[in-house]
Structures are given as C-alpha cells and as structure tokens.
Image: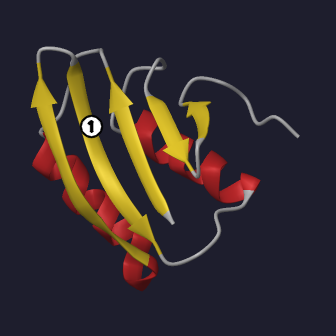
Amino acid sequence: MAASSNSESALRVGRDELGDALECLLGGRGEVTGGGVGRGGWNLDLQLEFEPSAAWIDELRAFLRAFDVSADTMIVLGGKDFLVGEARQE
C-alpha cells in the first residue's frame, strides 16, 4: 500500500534523518521510497507491505510527534487522510 506523510510546516529535523528512522520503524514491512522539500512543504513516500490498522496509525502518529513533526502534518494512506495531531477515530 502506498502511503505518504506531508506538511506545509517546517520540518524540525532532517528529512533524511526522519526517513532513516521510518525505515527502522517499518523493519521489513515496508520502505521509504522517496520524498521532497519545496516551497509548499515537505513529504516522505512509503510503500507498506501490510494493511495498516488504527493502532499502527496511532503508532506512526506518536513516532512522528517524537520527531517534533507539526500537528498539521498529514498522513495519507489508501486515499484517507489522518492528521498527526488528531486522536484515533473509530
């Protein structure tokens, strides 16, 4: 499944550093496949080898918050958007 994380807010850590840490989080279950930084913000693209559960999305939110990623950062999974700063929606 393709996924991405993007934000219009400044990234407070290096994108490469965050990408490397995401690779560790994913283990063998996926990989960072690309990303970019521009005037409109930044993004990281992921390829997941599993169907992410609500619990995993919460884990990803917590992981991104630990890197001081802005609460307005959007996680896009399978055409659905999830804000890093929002609580789980059942």
Q: Amino acid at mark 1?
A: Asn
Is residue 68 shown above or below 55? above
In front of the other: 80 or 12: 80
Residue 56 to residue 61: above or below: below
Where's residue 68, x and y in %?
35, 28
Q: Is residue 16 left or right of residue 42?
A: left
Q: Which is more toward the observer, 57 or 63?
A: 57
CA neighbours of label 1 inside 10 A, class few (<14), some (14 to 19), many (20+): many
**Picture residue at 42% right of the left edge, 71% below the top:** 26
Number of numbered discs: 1
**Residue with the mark numbered 1:** 43
Instruction: Name the side, left or right, on which 16 lies relative to 3.
Output: left
Whether residue 28 appears in this view of the structure is yes
Q: Residue at x 46, y 47 (%)?
A: 63
User: Can you tell which quarter of the image residue 89 is in?
Assistant: top right
Q: Quadrant of residue 43?
A: top left
Q: Secondary structure at mark 1?
A: strand
Q: Residue at x 30, y 16 (%)?
A: 8
Q: Where does residue 54 sit, x and y in percent of width and height?
A: 74, 52
Give the residue at the far right of this rendering.
90
Is the residue 79 above or below the residue 19 in the image?
above
